[in-house]
Image (spheres, helix red, strand yellow):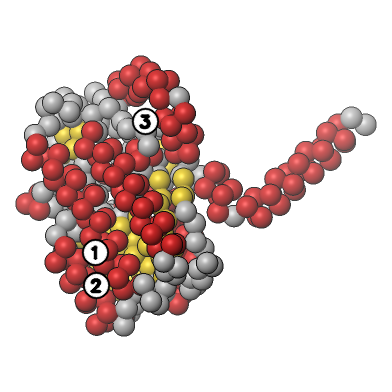
Amino acid sequence: MRISLKPLHEQVIVITGASSGIGLATASLAVEHGARVVLVARNEVTLADIERDLNASDRVLHVMADVGQREQLERVASETITRFGGFDTWINNAGSSVWGRFDEVSDEDHQQVMQTNFWGTHYGSSIAVRHLRDKGGALINVGSVESANALPFHSSYSASKHAIKAMTDVLRVELQKSRTPVSVTLVRPSSTDTQFMDHSKNYLPSAPVFPPPVYAPEVVARAILHAAEHPQRDVYIGNAKLLSKLAQNAPRLADWVNRTFVYDAIQSGRPDRHPRGALYAGDVGAAGDGKTSGDYPGRVLTRSLYARATQHPVATTAAVAVGAAALVALLGRRGR
C-alpha cells in the first residue's frame, strides 16, 4: 500500500516538547515552510513567547500539556481540531531524563522518565492514529541512538527509548496489515546540542555531557520534516546507525566501548547548574526554555551525511558523481 503525504505548506503539524531543542527547531522550520503548527509543552509562558516570536499570524497554536497524562493530550487533539479542523502529522518528541547509577536513582524518578517518554509517546500515538486512520497522515516518534545502544548512567531513558522502538515497530506492522494509510517513522538522533542536559535530573557528581560527535537540533528537525512529507521507516542521525548496528551485532564490543570510553566521557567534571532539571512539573522553567541549542563546549555539526544520503539518495548520488568527476579532472591536470 502506497501512502501519500501532503506537502508541508498544506499540513497541520502537532509537535510535543516544542518549548526547546529539537521540538522548537522543528516547529520553527515547519512554520518557515508554511505549515500550521501546534506547539505542545508544559511551559505555557515559554510557548506563548514562542508563538509570538514565530510571527505566523493565525498559523500557530500553543497548548500547555503534560504528555504523560492522556487526558491532557486528548485536549491537545480537541483544540487542534477546533482551531484547524484536524491535523496531518503528529510528532511525539517530548522527553525527560535522569542521569545516575541504576541503583542510586529513585524508583520515583525512573518511573517519571518512563511516564513521560514511553507513556507520553504511547498516548500520542494512540490519539494520532485514531484521528488519521481514515484520512491518512504521518506519525513520527522520536527515539534515540539509545533505542538500541544503551548509555551508562541512563538506564530509564535508554529503557524508554527501547520501549518506544518496540511499540512503534508493532504499531507500524499492524497498520500496514490493516492497510491503514498512516506512515509510522522512528527518528533516532545521536548526541544533539539542546537544553537536554539542563532539563535532566542529575545524580552524578558533575554535569553530564554527551559523547561526540554532537549535532545541531536543526539537523534532526530537517530529517523529521522530510519524513512528514516522504514516508520512511527509520531515520538515523549522524553515527546512530553505526552504534545501533554495533550494539545489535557485536554486543560485547559495544559493552567494552561503553565501559572503557563512554562511562568516563559522560562525566564532564564541571559543576551542574541545574541538578534538579525539569523532570517534574514543579521544576518546569527553572532550568530555562525557549532555546533550540544548548551549551555543548565542543564542535557542533550542522549536517548529517548519513541522514541526507538516506533521505535524498538521488541528490547525494549526483553530488558524489560531480565530486568524483571533479577529482578525476584535477588528477588528470596534475598528471600532465
- Where 87 falls versus 194 (above or below)? below
- Which type of secondary structure does the marked residue at label 3 adopt? loop
Badge 1 is on which residue? 40
Disc with the residue nearer the chain's start (3 vs 1)? 1
Residue under the image location 30 percent in, 70 percent down:
130
Question: Which residue reaches farthest right?
Answer: 336
Residue that extends furthest to the front in the rendered view of this protein: 177
Please tell me the numbered disc located at residue 277: none
Residue under the image location 34 percent in, 38 percent down: 146
Q: Which residue is mark 2?
A: 77
- At 32% across and 67% down in the image, what residue appears? 129
Residue density around tag 3, few if under 14, some if 14–19, many if 20 or more, within 10 Å? some
Residue that label 3 marks: 211
Q: Nearer the viewer, mark 3 or mark 2?
A: 2
Q: Earlier in the sequence, mark 3 or mark 2?
A: 2
Apparent side of residue 19 relative to residue 27 in the rendered image (left or right): left
Mark 2 is on which residue type? Ala
Q: Position of residue 52 (x, y in %)?
A: 27, 71
Between label 1 and label 2, give the one nearer the viewer.
Answer: 2
